[in-house]
Amino acid sequence: MILALTKNGIDVKTATDPNDFIYHSDYNTFKIIGNDTEDFTIPANSTAIYTVEHGLLIVPLVKAFMREDTKNAVVTQNNSIVDVVGLSCYLSLDAVGADYTQLKFTITNHDSSSHVAHIRYWLFEVPL
């Protein structure tokens, strides 16, 4: 059985171009297999690796976004101190990764006060 969903205006029964599909079970896609949020308190002027057990039997691909406690700006992996519409951020999400048991978030606090990092992440099954 094939499960398929096409873009608006395209007949799912006759479509053959992979780009016409939003989802097609015959084509490999990144499938979301989990998501969650975590909060970490980052001490002043420090860099640390924070870990979360993922409980999967594979090494997932991880995509994460971070918002710090006192700001409305959202930063992604590899952003250092960013300026979004005049909002400077004290925290940077330097690296995001995974191994067979844990997710790993490397976060730097560039300020002389501690801050809370609010992380939202998604886990993907990697199509091979």
Image (spheres, rainbow, N blue to C red):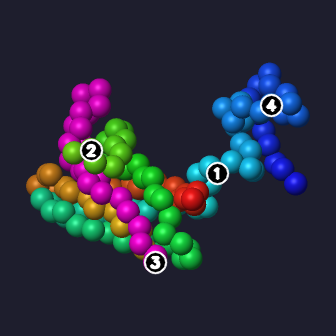
Q: Amino acid at mark 1?
A: Asn
Q: Secondary structure at mark 3?
A: loop
Q: Closer to us: mark 3 or mark 2?
A: 3
| Residue picked out by circle 1 | 28
First in sequence: mark 1 or mark 4? 4
First in sequence: mark 2 or mark 1? 1
Residue 1 picture quarter:
bottom right
Q: CA distance from mark 2 to mark 1?
A: 29 Å
Pointer 2: residues within 10 angstroms few (<14), some, or many (20+)?
some
Q: Secondary structure at mark 1?
A: loop
Q: Closer to us: mark 4 or mark 2?
A: 4
**Any part of residue 77 in sight:** yes
Q: Amino acid at mark 2?
A: Asn
Q: Secondary structure at mark 2?
A: loop
Decide which of 113, 33 is in the foreground and name it: 33
State the image coordinates of residue 11 (x, y, percent, origin top left). 85, 28
Instruction: Say which quadrant the C terminus sits in.
Output: bottom right
Residue 16 picture quarter:
top right
Decide which of 8, 65 is in the foreground and name it: 8
Identify which residue is drawn at 74% across, 50% down.
26
Return the mark for residue 15: 4
Pointer 1: residues within 10 angstroms few (<14), some, or many (20+)?
few
Q: CA distance from mark 3 to mark 4?
A: 40 Å
| Residue picked out by circle 2 | 79
Relative to residue 102, is residue 24 drawn left or right? right
